[in-house]
Structures are given as structure tokens and as C-alpha cells.
Image (cartoon, grey):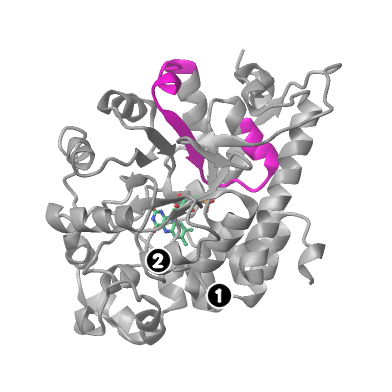
Amino acid sequence: PPLNRILNLQEMENVARRVLSKKALAYYSSASDDEISYQENARAFSQFFFLPRVLRPLSTTDPSTTILGFKSSIPVFVSAAGLAKLGHPLGEANITRGAGHTGIIQMVSSSPSLSYAQIAESRISPDQPLFFQLYKHKDDAQAERRVREVERLGYKAIFLTVDAVHLGNRERDIRAGWELDDMERMATNGVQKDDIPKKELPRKQEDLDLELEELDLTGTAGALIAKDDTDMTWEVTIPWLRGITKLPIGVKGIQCVEDAVLAAEAGVDAILLSNHGGEFFSIILLSLLADQSTSGRQLEYALPPIDVLYKLRRQRPEVFDKLEVYVDGGVKRGTDVVKALCLGARSVGLGRPFLYAQSAYGAAGVARAVRILEREIISCMRQLGVRKIEELVPKMVCASQCGES
Ligand code: FNR
């Protein structure tokens, strides 16, 4: 259908599902184990209900905000998601341009299918802010080089992903199989063909099955994430990052109240409550990128991030004064965004929806997705009796139809 017929993000996803190759769809859509966390991420939003106010002036509604001091037309950003070229030849550049034209911020993945420089060059102007998501190499010097590179390219913040140090189960992805030559062509970001450990890369589904039978899976996985730092700590890693960059630092992948408190104590500028979208990284992608950085996947049955946000607001409200809190996972509607903001989030990230949008319609699809969210957010704000983002407060939502209080 023509783009102007797409009215919501689910319709956008439906189109993407028709145009994506089997392997691209497997990579974009799959999640861990039985995909419970993935489904719950979205479902958890439906447990919160609004308590709208009436007889309030509404002549102007402004959904804009700032994120780490950078202007954003709506309280939404693009969460880091790798390999956009799997869905569209222009890949990440679609997202950069779509985000630029609509005034939102893109958090660029450590594992994109364009180089960090190409993505920076795709900005609509040098002022367009990009954030960078870091998978930390276990060699500090290599990790530092990467941070310096993106700093030099003008990226404005570093988000260290911390929920992906362990590699896990990836069943749907395995079943779909992978054609590695395509992957080799796509991963232009510093990966030379010769760097790819050929013998570890099964070329056909049969080979893959054979390898899984022959090899101890944890052993393979262990070998593949060998380049990533699996010993990161609050005490060492955060001060290290602070020591090598002046950019604001965020931690991506906080999944409980206690760690949010530790992040505040560690003095980071932002946290992204996230369970990686219930997602995991393909073992093959890992091996392909083994020379630069890798990731595991998040824990199945991790609490949906919106629920972590709710607990954090109730148990440790002071954390919100110390750093900016964002949330991602399962967001599809403006109402989801507004609920998160009522509960204290400053902004909300979306991963898959932007991958789908760019796969289906390129940069225009990304821009359309932002416009759809903008319309939904404004509509929700007006029905809540709210004109400005700052007016969204916890008492405007209640949990599980208010069995909570
Ligand atoms: C991701 N995610 C992710 N996170 C990260 O820190 N670095 C990465 O490279 C990626 N890559 C990636 C690829 C794909 C295909 C998916 C689906 C996810 C996680 C991502 O940043 C974000 O946390 C989730 O996507 C949010 O959930 P939704 O919006 O996809 O439901």
C-alpha cells in the first residue's frame, strides 16, 4: 500500500513482514527461548490505564522535549539496532535521514551495516545529534579507539550496553538459516573478509545443524564472545569510560531497581531500562563481527521495562532527579510513550518499529513512523488534559486498573 495509507506502526510492520527476506525477518523479529519477555514487553503497557483530567485549556499542545540537552520533536528516540541493510539497501542511512527530517535522535548500534562515518555523513545537517551505543571490547585500548572515533565523527553521547554479555538461545534464527556471503557484504564496518573466521561459519543449514550436534554450544558461544568484555563492573568500567570521554554516558540494559540506584551512584547521565527487546544476537552475526565487538542476548523472563520503571518510580523516586531515565521494548503506540512519561521516563526508545519502517518504505517510512507517533502522542496528551510534556505525572496512570492502591 502507498505510505500515506499506513496509519499505525503495526500496519507498517505488516508491510515489512511481506517485503523482508526470511532471514531478515528472522533477525529482526526473533526473540529468546519462547519469546515470553518479548511478548510481555508489549502486553505490560496494557496494564496501565489513564486518569484523564477535564476542563483544562488545550489550545496549544507541545510534545517536544530535550534528551541529554538535545532537542527532540517528540519524547522518542531510535534504539540501537544492528544491520539495517538486511531490510533495505540504504540501511541505517534511512533511519538517520528519517530521524533528521522529523527531529528525533538516533542511537546508532555498535554493529551497523554502514560505517559509523557513513551514518554520520547521512545526517541532514552537522547539527543533527546522533548517540552511539557501545559494546565494549575486552581490550580497553580497542574500546577506547572506537569511542574516540565516534567522538571525532560528532556523535553526542555514549550508551554502554550492559545486558548482553552472555550468549544464549536463538531458536527461530537458527531455523531460518543464514547466507553468509550476504552478511559479509553488509558488514562493512571495519570487518575485512579475511578477518572472518571461515571455518566457524557454517554455510548451509545442514552444516549449521551438524555443528550444533558436534560442538558443545556453550563452548562455541564462549569462543564467539571472547572479544567482548564480560567482566565489566560499576567500579571499574564506568570510571574508565568517564576517563576516556567527555561525552554524556548512558547505561543501556538496566533491568531492576537496584541497578538503577547503582547507576545513579556511579554518576552516569542516563539509563535505558531495557531487556534488549527480548532480543538476542545471532551466533553467526557474532562470529562475523568477532573482530570488533559482539553481544549475547537478554534474559528470557526479564521483567518488562515499563514494569521496572513503575517499580523504580514507587520505590526510589529520587533516582529520577539524578539522571535521565529512558525505557524501550514493546512500544508501538503514542499511548505507550505517554504512559512511560507519566511514570517518570524522559524519553522512550523504539527498535524494531524503525527497522520495519525503513525496510518497508526507506527514509520516508521512518519519517512517517515518527509522524504517526507524534499524532498519537498529541492526541493522547490532549485527551489527558495536558499541554506540555512536563505536565505528565504519575497520578495520571494507575496499574492493573488500580488494584495497586
Ligand atoms: C537490537 N537491540 C540492540 N541493542 C544494542 O544495544 N545493540 C544492538 O546492536 C542491538 N541490535 C538489535 C537488533 C535487532 C534486530 C533488535 C530487534 C534489537 C536492542 C534494541 O536496542 C532495543 O533495546 C529493542 O529493540 C527495543 O525493543 P523493541 O522496540 O524492538 O520492541
Q: Is residue 170 above or below residue 154?
A: below
Q: Position of residue 146 (x, y in %)?
A: 25, 58
Q: Residue at x 62, y 23 (%)?
A: 390
* Residue at the disc numbered 2: 112
Q: Position of residue 278 (x, y in %)?
A: 46, 51
Q: Amino acid at mark 1?
A: His
- Quadrant position of residue 369: bottom right
Q: Residue at x 37, y 86 (%)?
A: 181
Label 2: few (<14), some or many (≥20) within 10 Å?
Answer: many
Residues shaded magenta: 314-339
* Residue 233's disc number: none
The reply to whether residue 296 is visible in this rendering is: no
In-image side of 190 versus 18 (left or right): left
| C-alpha separation, residue under disc 2 versus residue under disc 1 | 13 Å
The verdict on residue 338 being magenta is yes
- Quadrant position of residue 291: bottom left
- SS for dot 1: loop
In-image side of 238 versus 276 (left or right): left
* Residue at the disc numbered 1: 88
Question: Is the CB of mark 2 within 8 Å of ligand 1?
Answer: yes
- Observer-nearest of 173 and 374: 374
Name of the residue lying farthest toward the front:
126
The verdict on residue 13 being magenta is no
